[in-house]
Amino acid sequence: MDRRSFLKTSGAIGATLACGKAHAAGPDPEAAREFVGVLVDTTRCIGCRSCEVACGKANSMLVPDVENDGALEKERSTSEKQWTVVNRYKTTKGDVFVKKQCMHCWQPGCTAACLTNAMFKTREGPVIWRADKCMGCRYCMVSCPFNIPKFEYNEWNPDIQKCTMCYSRLQEEKSPACVSACPSDALMFGPKRDLMEIARVRIYNHPTQYVRHIYGEHEVGGTGWLYLSAVPFEQIGFRADLGTTPYPEYTKEFLYSVPILDFGLPTLLVGLKLLTDQVARKDHDSEDGEV
Amino acid sequence: MSTTATALSPSNGASRLLRFLLDELKPRPPFFTPFNLISVPIVLVGLVILAIRFTQGLGSVTNLNQDFPWGFWIGFDVVTGVALAGGAYVVTFVVYVLKVERYHPIVRVTVLNGFLAYVFYAGGLVLDLGKPWHIINPIIGNSFGYNSVLFLVAWHFVLYMVAEFIEFSPAIAEWMGARRLRRFLQSITVGTVIAGFTISTLHQAGLGALFLMAKGKIHPLWYTEFMPVLFFVSSIFAGLSMVIVEGTLSHRVLKDHMDEEHGAFDKLIFGLARGAALSLFAYYFFKSLIFIHEHHWNLMGDFWGNWYLLEILGLTLVPCVMFAYGIRHRSLGVVRAAAVLAILGVILNRLNISVITFNWFLPNHYYPSWQELWITAMIICCEIWVFRFVVTRMPVLRKARDFD
């Protein structure tokens, strides 16, 4: 399936779904919206790092000197200057290039961690960060399973830096800058439902070319960015031990217990106090009796 | 002690009060005490470090980096400091709810210690924030992140500071000679204690819950879904051990400011030790259950296994047994030593979870810079200054004259 027919099909699917949902839920345009994401096919990535350059330009961040900086020589992480990086991994099937950025989790740990809603999951799917709300506590960094939010340690007024899936471009009906810049169709933008279908079709059609796993389908409850690979994902820098539970779930029990304790415990304590009052009074009375 | 501050004419009263406050605020000799000679330079250099920190960013004075967003300031000052301040909610609960009157003499000093610990150590959090001027966002309500553990911890922190201030405020009223105010403040003490206990339970547990989403980053020997419960239980013996140690120290140093009732601290120690021993045992038992249930013996044998054993045997089981031995044989020395070990155990536990085993698998591990340690020392010195100011002026370690 080429890109055009994909877009046509996905448009048709989307429209059908939109109609179906709109019909069921009434005229609410928001209800029809699906979270978007990006499918990364690491077997197609040629390591040209055009995405890094495009990202830097689109978001006024560092634009790397791809020709001369030799950055592929060692494994890098995203930084407070670069929202996305491409790494090269030596694998059993030769060199594999892997783009790294925010995964835009379905239920993000960072947004559950944020006490000011500065880290925010938008209706469209991208997870964005809002400077006017953030107090710089860095709890999002502690809570992100992928270590994506980065902090400007050398600024007096530091920001958190992370990929926003080019949220402002999306609102102009454009794709993320990295997707638009990719020359090898390694990146594909769209609603996750469609991307999953594409990914599955590729695996079924080329069973020898891919491992039968789509990273991000279920990891930490599902992510917006999905990855296809020819080799097991541990070989190309992914953690395989993150589980399928959305990270906010880990704090749910505690959060539920808070109102219960906040109202239940005082009731218990007041009862206890009334009891000890009574005991104290009895003691007092009997003492008086003795005297 | 002036009782005229309650004079009928408000303007007269206000000017008298102002004069009284100015008089009291003046530092009193001796100035060249050993503590002053040490603390003044520490604070002065600390101010320089803070000036650099607030102009050049956190990276200029700390070793924090992208892999270690929380370091010594959060791990020790906030997470550990709050656990060690747990004595206040335990002692007020015992005195005001359980009505065990013999602990009444230590209520004020314990609440004062707790309050100052919150103000300074939890206040130290502000130094660690990237945008501290946005700290009002979650409080005044333009951005409520209800689903955040930190949101709940922050709110419970703030409310508990208010509760502790109210619990302590009768001492301030006595100091100012405000009788009517004192009567009012005392009438709300029990309600405040109940609220304070509730809030404490939750934010002590909440500090443990903060790390629930650091799954995969904290070593599995320390990461457990029961961290909130463990943090709460351990704050009980941490707080009680702190009361024992602080009480012992202040009864050496501040003997002159104590009356007879407050001077007789030693006979309370065994009761406090009993509470500490019981909660230590409950904690140890709970830890053992988790160890067995999660098959943690598979993780023994390497450095982290031994490090875990040091914490759980050397600094949890050993002080528990020592407390029991000390109580049985009426040995103050053993009980005090046990309290010190238990405190060390809690410090190690909190640091293990927040800093030491955080991202344990990374090659370049975080360790605090000298500036981070220095600022912590500065915070402690400032706290002691305020503590000294209060106990030498307000009726904390003695009964107020003219009252009761």
Image: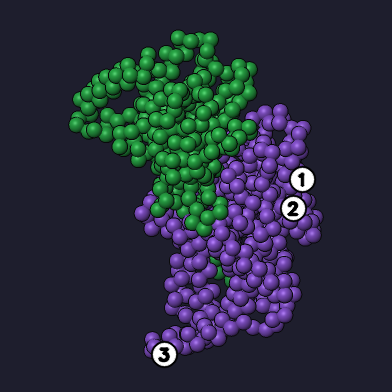
Chain colours: A green, B purple
Q: Which residue is mark 2?
A: B341
Secondary structure type for disc 1: helix
- What is the spatial separation of the Cα atoms under label 2 and label 1, in whole angstroms? 8 Å
Lower position in the chain sequence, tag 3 or tag 2: 3
Subunit that carries the residue with mark 2: B
From this viewpoint, which residue is outermost toward the front? Answer: A67
Nearer to me, A119 or A290 = A119
User: Within 10 angstroms of label 3, few (less than 14), some, or many (20 or more) residues?
Assistant: some
Number of labels in the image equals 3
Q: Amino acid at mark 3?
A: Asn
Q: Are marks 2 and 1 on the same chain?
A: yes
Q: Which residue is mark 3?
A: B12
Where does the image place residue B126, in percent across and percent down from the top left? 53, 59
Could you tell me which residue is drawn at 63 percent across and 78 percent down? B392
Give the quarter of the image for residue B209: top right
Look at the numbered discs 2 and 1 and tell me whether their residues touch, using CB distance below 8 Å.
Answer: yes
Disc 2 is placed on an element classified as: helix
The residue singled out by tag 1 in the image is B314
Query: Residue A130's mark?
Result: none
Q: Do we see residue A267 in this rendering?
A: no
Residue drawn at (71%, 61%) of the image: B245
Question: Residue at point 68% right, 42% down?
Answer: B364
Specify few, some or many for label 2: CA neighbours under 10 Å numbering under 14, 14-19, or 20 or more.
many
B185 is higher (above) or lower (below) than A283 = below
Between the residue at mark 3 and the residue at mark 2, the CA separation in whole angstroms equals 54 Å
